[in-house]
Amino acid sequence: MSTTVILFWFLSALALLGAMMVLISKNPVFSVLWLIVVFFAISGHYLLLNAQFLAIVNLIVYAGAIMVLFLFVIMLMNLNSNTEPQKNTWLKVAGAIAGGSFMLIMIDVLIDAKDMQTKTALIKEGNIGLIKNLGRVLYNDYLIPFEITSVLFLSAMVGAVVIGKKGEAPNQ
Amino acid sequence: MMFSGILVKHHAALKNIAIAGLLVLLGLNVGENYGFALFDINTTNMLHFERFGLLFNSICIFSTLLFVMLSGKDVEKVGNYTAEYFALIFFILCGIGIVTSYVNLMMLFIGIEIISIPSYILTGSDKKNLKSNEASLKYFLMGAFSTGIMLMGIALLYGTSGTFLVERAAAQTPSISYLEAMGLLLLFISLSFKVSLAPFHFWTPDVYDGAPTVFTSFMATIVKVAGFAAFIRLFESRYGSMGSQTERLIAIVIVLTLAFGNLTAVFQQSVKRMLAYSSIAQAGFMLFALFSLNDAAKEGLILYAAAYCLATIGIFAVLVKMEDGTFEGFNGFGKSQPLLAGVLTIFLLSLAGIPLTAGFFAKYYMLASVVKTGNNLGLVIIAVLFAAVSAYYYFKVIQAMFFKDGDVSFPAVTSRFKYLMVAVAAVIVILGIFPNLLLQFMYF
């Protein structure tokens, strides 16, 4: 086993462990902290794929900015395990059955996807993730989605103003 | 992209500018349908404008125009941010323009999001109403979840084919792999959520009930219909690789949707809630287009979209002005406002699918398309049965209007409003007699 393969398995295990702990942790603050672990592991994966830009952006935006917001909100709301609403047992059972069958299907699908094994991502090779190539693709092939996304963000901003602006003072 | 030009205008507000903008947009769209494009941009395999999508856009824009003309006043009453509300509506139209013409799954995702996010906001725009807030939050959380499912589906599809293109991905793999089927299934689930098909409909009544009535009218018609355009475009090109399994799945969803929507609508007390449930039932009918996926289905969907949008917008335009939204609230409406009541009757008849209205031919085309696929008559019979059930609750409103006494507190309306309503009803009747007037735009 080469180093990259070992790294890959280690990061995958770490990401899975982190994701499990996010769900299991009773304390929401711990959940958020575990989520940061997940993001770091995934950033590691990006690095293995030679996508430095994506890795860094993932760290800065998700692990950095968004997680801080999460932590703020959770601490402001002062959640803890006592205030967590009790869930109906039947709902839990139904959820377990539905989720379980979904998991079975997914596992089955993945086992079946043998042809994917030859198509696994090229570790250490490929340079599409480098910032130069990424920019070239983004502004040539994917220019339209890139521009249209601005409409999405604009609408989100307008919405934030509509919802968030205080007071019902008369317009203008 | 001729849709982006419209987005600048949310600074200068007000109904009339919105109407003017919509007229320009409609003109450009129809012009493009005739091969006259204002400007032509290379979209590098992201969007592909063709008849079906353009005609669909025209219907959506036209319905929005009617919506603004009929209910523009009421939009102003919702809150202080009239300009923003109109801007959000235009954003949604922009999303619709993408969703009806995408060839790339990435554009599908962006389009759906551009439609959804303003919808969440419009739902919650009545900030002082607790129900509106609740509906908005519920819609947002569920919508975000379904977006996640959609992304997962797109990722799986990309994993199997190595491309986001809808067409090429289908051509590459003649027999469908499980992974691809899973991706399609996840996409199906998330799109079903967006158009509120049966197992994924639970948000619909609450959201439509909680949202300000004006915006319910917009979301229940134009937004929902656009979802079906996305559906058709996605499955049309994937159909060769799907086979009977998917057909069975869609059939089950149709029956569930029809059953749930119609049977629950029967027991509603509030007209608004009844319309919410009936919109689920109508979605079931529109899904027939996906089931049969032939030319008749496409024609049917276009007609259905037009008939359903026009009628529902008309009903809501009256309902917004009503103070009492229950069935009793309509008691005696026929005596105090005979003209409006008559027009309303036409809308309701059209929704129920009575002949001589557009709704009849819409349903007819849908069922005919299923008959054309052969040996699915059972489904057709079920559909007809549920259409009969739906007639029951639509007629309940008509009965309340004409055969029950009561005083209706209905504010005075301008004569312009009345003329417009009559015009809409006339369009519905004309489409009900000559549906080809609309369908001819698909072929010329």
Image (tube, coloured by chain):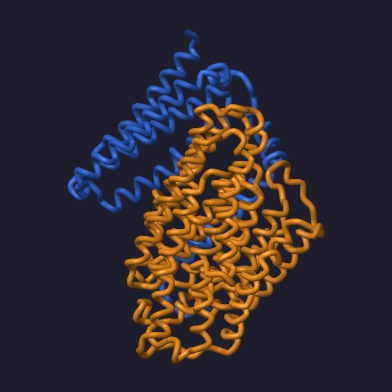
Chain colours: A blue, B orange
Q: Quadrant of the N terminus of chain B?
A: bottom right
Name the one closer to the observer, B392 or B97: B392
Decide if residue B225 is on the left or right side of residue B390: right
Q: Vertical placement of B262 versus B173: above or below?
A: below
Q: Is residue A4 visible?
A: yes
For residue B205, what is the image quadrant? Answer: bottom left
Name, please, the residue furthest toward the top.
A1
Q: Residue at x 50, y 63 (%)?
A: B219
Q: Vertical placement of B378 versus B156: above or below?
A: below
Name, please, the residue furthest toward the left.
A82
Q: Residue at x 61, y 29 (%)?
A: B162
Name the one closer to the observer, A127 or B275: B275
Q: Is residue A166 visible?
A: no
Decide if residue B439 is on the left or right side of residue B281: right
Please state the horizontal and vertical placement of residue B137, each as a whole percent of the image: 38, 58
Q: Vertical placement of B161 versus B102: above or below?
A: above
Please state the horizontal and vertical placement of residue B416, each as a whole percent of the image: 60, 86
For residue B388, what is the image quadrant? Answer: bottom left
Q: Quadrant of the C terminus of chain B?
A: bottom right
Q: Vertical placement of B77 versus A118: above or below?
A: below
